[in-house]
Amino acid sequence: QSVLTQPPSVSAAPGQKVTISCSGSNSNIGNDYVSWYQHLPGTAPKLLIYDNNKRPSGIPDRFSGSKSGTSATLGITGLQTGDEADYYCGTWDSSLSVGVFGGGTKLTVL
Amino acid sequence: QAQLVESGGGVVQPGRSLRLSCAASGFTFRNYGMHWVRQAPGKGLEWVAVIWFDGSKEYYADSVKGRFTISRDNSQNTMSLQMNSLRAEDTAVYYCARFDANQWDPWGQGTLVTVSP
């Protein structure tokens, strides 16, 4: 059971938009920045969003992030088949001094 | 360009030990906290441990506390994870990751640890 809660799967057609939610508590998301990662099996997880809503250089603006209270959301617009992957939210729980991740959401682009 | 490379994975019997290493390059290693994160087969990412930039503090997930020890050598730009009393549930791909302010970036490619009789 992961500390942060994500839907197990989401799906949408190419070109459409999808959102992935991440729910936590006051000790983690409510008190710290959230980051999002894209993970393909056998590869290194890739940072997509940091500090709740910022994109590293090289990440297209089709990817966006937001946070409100103890929840965060990853948005992906203009879906492409290459976006099919597992997506994870994560944060550093400064009150417990532990890292926490969501259980992951598998994105299928139909 | 920051890069991390893990090594040391393999097949080990329950109760035995294994030591993983993470070699860093392309950035000033001594300035960053470093983490281990694992992914068991069919499961999500699970945070394992962190060591402060100067090695002054270490924190562990409850699932590995008392069995795993994280360490680093800033003169060699390396980090290690000593895993003792291994259990079947420790079977996973282990990733090392740099903690940059508030996020894990970059990550290594991972090293597979299989605990099996």
Image (tube, rainbow, N blue to C red):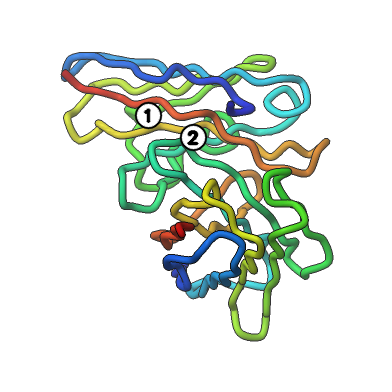
* Residue type, mark 1 in image: Phe
Q: Residue B5 or B66: which is nearer the viewer?
A: B66
Discs 1 and 2 lie in a common subunit: yes
The local secondary structure at tag 2 comes to strand
Q: Chain of mark 1?
A: A
State which quadrant residue A81 falls in: top left
| Residue assigned mark 1 | A63
- State the residue lying farthest toward the front: B117
Residue at the spot 83% in from the left edge and 36% down from the top edge:
A95
Quarter the N terminus of chain A occupies: top right
Please give left or right for residue B18 compared with residue A29 in the image: left
At label 1, counting other C-alpha atoms closer than 10 Å, the crowd grade (few under 14, some 14-19, many 20 or more) is many
| Residue A49, above or below A70 | below
Residue contact at pointers 1 and 2, CB within 8 angstroms: yes
Find residue A97 and report its horizontal and vertical position in percent. 78, 44
Find residue B90 and report its horizontal and vertical position in percent. 54, 51
* Residue type, mark 2 in image: Trp
